[in-house]
Amino acid sequence: MSIKKIGIVTFPIGEAGVIPLRNLVRIMTAANAELYLVTGNAALNAFSNNENVHVIGVRHNLGSNLLTKILNYSNTQFKILLDVIKISKKIKIYVFFIDGSFLTPSILALKLLRKKVILALPSSVFQDIGVFTIPAAFISRISIKLSDQIVVYSESLITEYKISKYKTKISIAHEHFLDFDKFKSKNPVQDRDSVVGYVGRFSEEKGITNFSKAIPEILKEQDGIHFLIGGGGLLQDEITSYIKQEQLNNRVTFTGWVQDEDIIAVLNQLKLLVVPSYTEGLPNIMLEAMACGTPVLITPVGAIPGVIKDGETGFIMENNSPEVIARNVMRALNHPDLQQIANKARKFVEQEFTFEKAMQGYQTIFSKFN
């Protein structure tokens, strides 16, 4: 990768976005690229002491009602646009990442300035986000059309995102890699207590509500199971209230947001991790669980079917309704080859999600601009 200066632009992110952004930054800096990073919120602390990155910080407040959300969103868009223009004389190529498809004004400005734009789509940009769904999809379509290159995690996502007509400028790559000396099994699955977990954002698209509603159904089948729920977000009050209402407090442990240094210990407590998302790209928590020898039960969305093969490297459920989650949790826990599945999953991620493979993918993309 011979590009010397690269701009990475994201909408201000939460805690869940820090790891993928950190991985992308590491890939770029390992290639001796000088990075200019326009981002905000949780990412500001994550990169404040990184001497290899010029961080341009933008703060974003969500807002308490529809009007303030629109005003705050517009204000953040404008601030990012100004920052991108300010550094445009220094940089030829920009990577828009993590909600970058919503930054159409900045992408349009860069195209007018004759810069190259790579749009990475780490998750579906066409998910249901309430009243903003239609305008967000429209904005994302414009960004996709304007971009010089589009990056997705797998071939299957080209069809899922309905972007086949742009196939000539689509590349397959990802920023996922793990330190396998850190992420490993501390104890065999067969020796673990029957703990079923969810770790992630408490937001509608992640299926956390359905997972919570599946807990009473699971306990009807097997009374000795305990549940661990890690994370936080907009639905936190709703989820905790439901658990209390159903008198499940003695069966459910809430950990709060799981910090990087604690995730390995948490995953090693679980006999099964459930990822009941409506939409995903390539969830990092799935890969981390596999590396820790923790079987994963997951919906077949995004790039997941290329990683999880039912009964081989994990378990697939046909949808994320509470009834289906409950039935498949029991199927997974009672599977006679659970340990073998965990072993195969670990071997798969060891082979496919190395730093070298992640870097190769982006090297191929940047070689197109030399």
Image (spheres, helix red, strand yellow):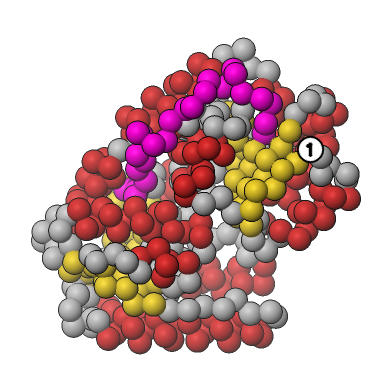
Q: Would residue 301 appear left or right of 52 to someone viewing this image?
A: right
Image location of residue 211, percent across then percent down? 72, 43
Name the residue carrying label 1.
251
Q: Is residue 292 above or below residue 170?
A: above
Residue at 60% over, 46% down:
199
Residue at 55% over, 28% down:
295
Q: Main secondary structure of the magenta part?
A: loop
Read off the magenta span: 173-196
Residue at 42% over, 85% down:
79
Q: Quadrant of residue 195?
A: top right
Quadrant where the C terminus sits is bottom left
Residue 298 appears in the figure? no
* Element carrying mark 1: loop
Image location of residue 132, percent across then percent down? 61, 72
Front one among 267 and 344: 267
Q: Would residue 69 appear left or right of 41 to someone viewing this image?
A: right
Residue at 49% over, 27% down:
186
Q: Is residue 283 above or below residue 219?
A: below
Q: Is residue 23 above or below residue 268?
A: below
Q: Quadrant of residue 247?
A: top right
